[in-house]
Amino acid sequence: MRIQLLLQNLVSFTIHASVFVLVLFLPLVSSSQEHSKATTHAGNKDYHSHKQSQKLLFEITLHGFLLWASLGFLMPVGILVIRMSNREECGRRLKILFYVHAILQTLMVLLATAGAVMSIKNFNNSFNNYHQRIGVALYAIIWLQALVGFVRPKRGSKARSVWFFAHWLLGTSVSLLGVLNIYTGLQAYHEKTSRSIRLWTIIFTAEMSFIAFFYLLQDKWVYTKKQGVILGDEPKRPIDQHTSPSDTQKELVVKSC
């Protein structure tokens, strides 16, 4: 009986003690679990935030590369190519230069359009900075220039002069605004990521300087080469001849005869 009573008391004490422990530590366990969940949630949130920032950085970099490839490379190279055709009157070489120019400019339009779609889809376009404002105007001029290029009149027609001036004016505007917007884009990239843009600015400036030098050299190259050549119809300068005494004597002898 005593053993049975002792066992009952022990079971009763164990139950009450268990209940007491549960009541005492359950809030702590629950709080610990909530803290663990909150920590895990915060960690997941930080992870997703980091992942999103990395994705945004990649999209910004890709956007900048597309705009550099289109407006900072293909556009000026296409202009250099079509200027080379000015010295060609006709023939196969002229056609090749024209088609190379058309292909480069078509690729430029496609890459610039892809960059514009990326900026509209993924970026916050509040248009509160010069880069976004210039970009909108630039995209419109690019497509207007493309349409003007497709309606090119035949050489010799009355509308050819007007078309040529409009095509030249739009192309010049795209080139200047494109270069300007690349510089403003580099500055926006620096403000967004706090990364240095000095190296990229130097490289792009060196590239533009070389293209500008080559652009100016194209008009002077043929003229420079002609400086060392005497043309057939160019009047020759009189050359002073030195008359020797013996020649003078010969002339006197002839006259005397």
Image (cartoon, rainbow, N blue to C red):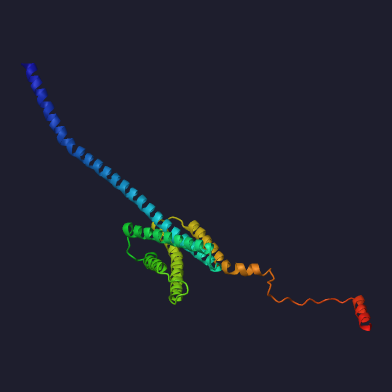
Residue furthest bottom in the image: 256
Which residue occupies the extreme left position in the image? 1
Number of numbered discs on residues: 0
Q: Is residue 11 visible?
A: yes
Residue, x 24% and y 42% (percent of image)? 37
x then y, percent, for residue 164: 46, 73
Residue 127 drawn at (x, y percent): 34, 65
Seen as rendered, the residue at the extreme front is 257
In the image, what residue occupies the spot 51% across and 58% down?
A: 203
The one of 243 and 167 positioned closer to us in this rendering: 243
Nearer the observer, 34 or 25: 34
Residue 40 picture location, percent across and down: 27, 42
Q: Quadrant of the N terminus?
A: top left
Q: Is residue 112 above or below residue 2?
A: below
Across and down, in percent, residue 200 comes to 48, 57
Work out whether residue 186 can be spotted: no
Quadrant hosting residue 162: bottom left
Q: Residue 125 falls in which quadrant of the image?
A: bottom left
Closest to the observer: 86 or 30? 86
User: Horizontally, is 16 left or right of 213 in the view?
Assistant: left
Q: Quadrant of the C terminus?
A: bottom right
